Image (cartoon, helix red, strand yellow):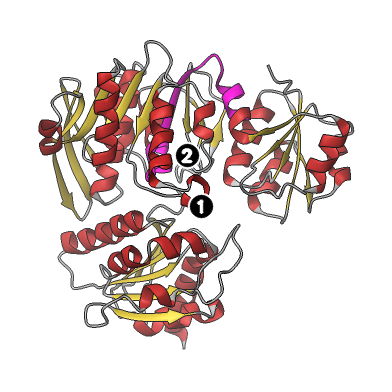
């Protein structure tokens, strides 16, 4: 057992860290931490009782008045020479990862862990909404903020704890799930794993962590997740599949958890009809895209496996209004040269995710019966990922009618000499998609506006600083009416 009476979190303002900090505060722990910059999550934590310093320094360990019993870090994001980590080592204070802390916080609960290359945050959030719809009060830790709840973590009064299981650094192997959901598997984070085979293996290892009497839940529409499910069945692991009818029929060895019977796209949302462990339910998804329909099916099944009544769980999932930066609506321009333009923002940073969100945007426009075009502004995330998937990104972005591609957001990586986002735009067909490479972030809004016509659907896409651009675009396009 780890002594969690006084916890210091390095990088406390991050999406994952701030969530576990809130849970610790709710449980009566003394919480301190530091972050490289001030932010809304930092200020909210301070208001809740945490002692937070902006900037990293050894003396931050005594922010609460005494040394912490444990220091928490995300090794992928925090340099090993961080002065707080060095001071903790010198003082003999245990240093653990966020996943270790989350594993401790989940002890004694029915643990629902959502893993997969894509869709973890949305599926986790929908699972929470489904359980809440069924009258439960689950604890949860999510990598993004639920739009409806306005928070990314909660210390609930119920017996269920729902959380994301991040595979990027194999930290998902810290958990012992009762319900383990795998949404999909596709090579990613090769800077950590080295090979696709090593990446796939971590999911097989995750299956081995399921507690006796627990279930593996896999999306049978995804070939690698379905193959994982088939291997689990052969190994004797209780496994349930979810997906559309055709995929369900193609994998008879996997017991059916949810069969999606129909998903009809309309301007008001996607009407879903599904059979959940023999019970037929109907609900309307507010967020577009077949990938979101699949995520919702996983969430409904998770809620039912935790004891929720199927119809109430489905109704709760249908009430889900989205997660920040997952097809997040910023507004519609009322008048002027950009009248009718709708601005959305999405976190997609892998080619499959970019494909899914742009396909969803096209389906939304088609369902409305409008002639609106889809205009995308994309910022690649990580040099390694951009190099590995340059053709796939080009193919995905050609689903847009017009695309502005910003330069690479390196995050934790150093620049690679000679590599820019041109390796993507040079592979795009200008006869299919009007494309601009825009290396100057300060000019990004103006470049997007040059390509945008009245009524268009505009999407900012990526995991880096592009997150700031949707609000700027909405503001600039609105002000253009006064010009």
**Whether residue 259 is situated above or below residue 380 in the rendered picture:** above
Q: Which image quadrant for residue 280? A: top left
Q: Is residue 313 visible?
A: no
Q: Is residue 304 left or right of residue 47?
A: left
Q: Can residue 157 be seen in this view?
A: yes
Q: Which image quadrant for residue 376? A: bottom left
Residues at marks 2 and 1 touching, judged by CB atoms closer than 8 Å:
no
Q: Is residue 151 left or right of residue 353?
A: right
| N-terminal label among 2 and 1 | 2
Q: Which image quadrant for residue 131? A: top left
**Residue in the image at 84% along x and 43% along y:** 60
**Residue in the image at 39% along x and 56% along y:** 350
**Residue in the image at 52% along x and 82% along y:** 443
Residue 117: image location, x then y, percent:
39, 44
For label 1, the residue is 191
Residue 442: image location, x then y, percent:
56, 79
Query: Closer to the camera, 225 or 58?
Result: 225
Query: Closer to the camera, 447 or 44?
Result: 447
Q: What span is in magenta?
A: 101-125
Dot 1 surroundings within 10 Å: few (below 14), some, or many (20 or more)?
some
**Whether residue 198 is situated above or below residue 356 in the rendered picture:** above
For label 2, the residue is 167
**Helix, strand, or loop for circle 1?**
helix
């Amino acid at each position: 057992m780890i002594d969690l009476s006084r916890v210091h979190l390095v990088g406390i303002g991050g999406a994952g860290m701030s969530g576990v900090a809130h849970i610790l505060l709710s449980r009566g722990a003394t919480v301190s931490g530091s972050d490289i910059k001030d932010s809304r999550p930092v200020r909210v934590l301070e208001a809740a009782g945490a002692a937070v310093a902006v900037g990293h320094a050894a003396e931050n360990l005594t922010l609460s008045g005494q040394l912490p019993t444990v220091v928490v870090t995300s090794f992928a994001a925090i340099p090993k020479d961080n002065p707080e980590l060095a001071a903790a080592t010198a003082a003999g204070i245990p240093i653990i990862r966020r996943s270790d802390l989350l594993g401790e916080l989940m002890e004694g609960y029915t643990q629902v862990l959502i893993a997969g290359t894509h869709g973890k945050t949305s599926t986790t959030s929908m699972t929470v909404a489904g359980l809440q719809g069924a009258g439960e009060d689950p604890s949860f830790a999510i990598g993004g903020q639920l739009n409806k709840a306005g928070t990314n973590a909660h210390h609930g009064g119920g017996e269920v704890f729902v959380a994301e299981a991040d595979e990027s650094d194999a930290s998902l192997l810290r958990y012992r799930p009762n319900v383990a959901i795998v949404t999909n598997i596709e090579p990613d984070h090769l800077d950590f794993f080295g090979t696709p085979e090593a990446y796939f293996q971590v999911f097989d290892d995750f299956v081995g962590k399921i507690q006796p009497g627990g279930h593996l839940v896999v999306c049978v529409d995804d070939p690698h997740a379905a193959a994982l499910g088939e291997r689990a069945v052969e190994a004797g692991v209780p496994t349930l599949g979810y997906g559309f009818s055709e995929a369900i029929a193609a994998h008879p060895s996997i017991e059916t958890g949810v069969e999606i019977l129909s998903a009809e796209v309309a301007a008001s949302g996607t009407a879903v009809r599904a059979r959940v462990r023999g019970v037929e339910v109907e609900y309307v998804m507010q967020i577009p895209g077949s990938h979101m329909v699949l995520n919702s099916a996983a969430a409904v099944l998770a809620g039912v496996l935790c004891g929720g009544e199927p119809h109430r769980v489905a109704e709760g999932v249908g009430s889900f209004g989205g997660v920040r930066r997952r097809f997040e609506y910023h507004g519609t321009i009322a008048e002027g040269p950009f009248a009718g333009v709708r601005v959305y923002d999405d976190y997609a940073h892998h080619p499959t995710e970019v494909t899914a969100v742009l396909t969803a945007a096209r389906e939304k426009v088609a369902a409305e019966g409008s002639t609106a075009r889809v205009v995308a502004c994309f910022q690649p995330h990580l040099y390694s990922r951009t190099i590995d998937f340059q053709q796939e990104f080009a193919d995905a972005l050609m689903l847009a009618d017009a695309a502005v591609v910003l330069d690479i957001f390196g995050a934790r990586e150093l620049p690679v000499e000679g590599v820019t986002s041109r390796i993507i735009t040079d592979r795009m067909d200008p006869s299919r998609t009007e494309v601009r490479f825009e290396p100057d972030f300060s000019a990004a809004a103006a470049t997007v506006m040059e390509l945008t016509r009245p009524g268009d659907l505009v999407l900012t896409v990526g995991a880096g600083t592009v997150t700031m651009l949707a609000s700027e675009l909405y503001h600039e396009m609105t002000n253009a009416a006064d010009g």
